[in-house]
Amino acid sequence: MGGKLIVFEGVEGGGKTTQIELAKAWLCSRLGEKVPVVVTREPGGTGLGKKIRQLLLEEEEERIGDRAELLLYAADRAQHVSDFLQPWLDKNALVLCDRYTDSTIAYQGYGRGIDLNLIRQLNEIATGGLKSDLTIWFDVEVEIGLSRAKKRGASDRIEQTEIAFHRRVQQGFAELAATSKSRFVRVDANLPVNQVQQQIQLFLQEFLFTHGYSEISAIS
Ligand code: T5A
């Protein structure tokens, strides 16, 4: 069957971190121990990645230039693919990943204005061509997402960027969803946690069925 990469994407505060854990628990309850289910994130899914994450998100006196930022995300991803994602996929795991290549298109491309083709090439280099099998897009209004993130605690470097930037990022995800319909699904992330969770479970149920996991579990 091979492992599968399921990515959670969207603007700040959409609820990805909350829902990825709920999705893991639900998948484990459906699949038992026969299929490993692992959770990871970008940036920061490896030891090197944790150091890169710190560089990217902590507020420093020296401003990180847009291209330097792009390359740091790419370095994090290259390490993540080779040391975490691919090894788990080779073990036939379901890998749930908080952000992946589409975040770079949306944030560094639509948000910062870096050429989209250049980013696609860089994504290709960093991933060696590894693509998500399913991308769940958390479509939340920018203001709602930012206020949730703010309530949670101190904002990081990117959350502090002006609102127009976050609107461009949102536009990026909307365009990606419209042009990559075969792997993108949209959840209405403005809704309460349990309703977002229900939408995700329906998509995951369909995904498991389509990819032959129904033979492993009690999925009907
Ligand atoms: N980035 C990343 C790039 O610019 N380029 C890239 O290539 C990549 C990979 C990562 C930053 O890096 C940028 C994007 C980001 O700015 P991060 O800390 O991982 O930083 O940021 P996020 O992924 O945005 O994580 P957040 O924690 O901010 O948002 P989440 O995970 O979407 O939301 P979550 O679950 O933490 O929820 C936030 C708060 O809202 C509550 C939660 O309890 C929590 O308090 N909440 C809800 N409240 C009401 N209703 C709901 N439905 C709720 N769901 C959650």
Image: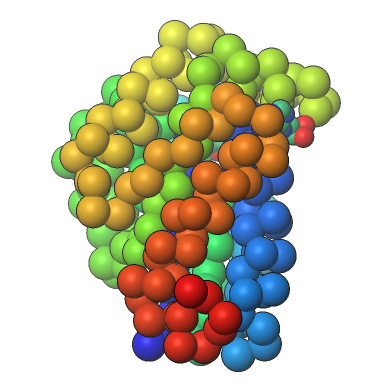
Which percent across, then down, holds residue 27? 61, 69
Nearest the viewer among 201 and 79 is 201
Residue drawn at the location 52% of the way across and 75% of the way down: 219
Determine whether 198 is above or below 218 in the image: above
Judged left or right of residue 62, residue 90 is left
Quarter of the figure with residue 145: top right
Nearest the viewer among 168 and 56 is 168
The answer to whether residue 162 is visible is yes
Determine whether 35 is above or below 132 in the image: below
The answer to whether residue 11 is visible is no
Give the farthest residue toward the front.
Answer: 220
Residue drawn at the location 40% of the way across and 72% of the way down: 209
Nearest the viewer among 106 and 49 is 106
Which percent across, then down, holds residue 155? 72, 23
Which percent across, then down, holds residue 160? 63, 17
Quarter of the figure with residue 206: bottom left
Nearest the viewer among 69 and 208 is 208
Determine whether 199 is above or below 82 in the image: above
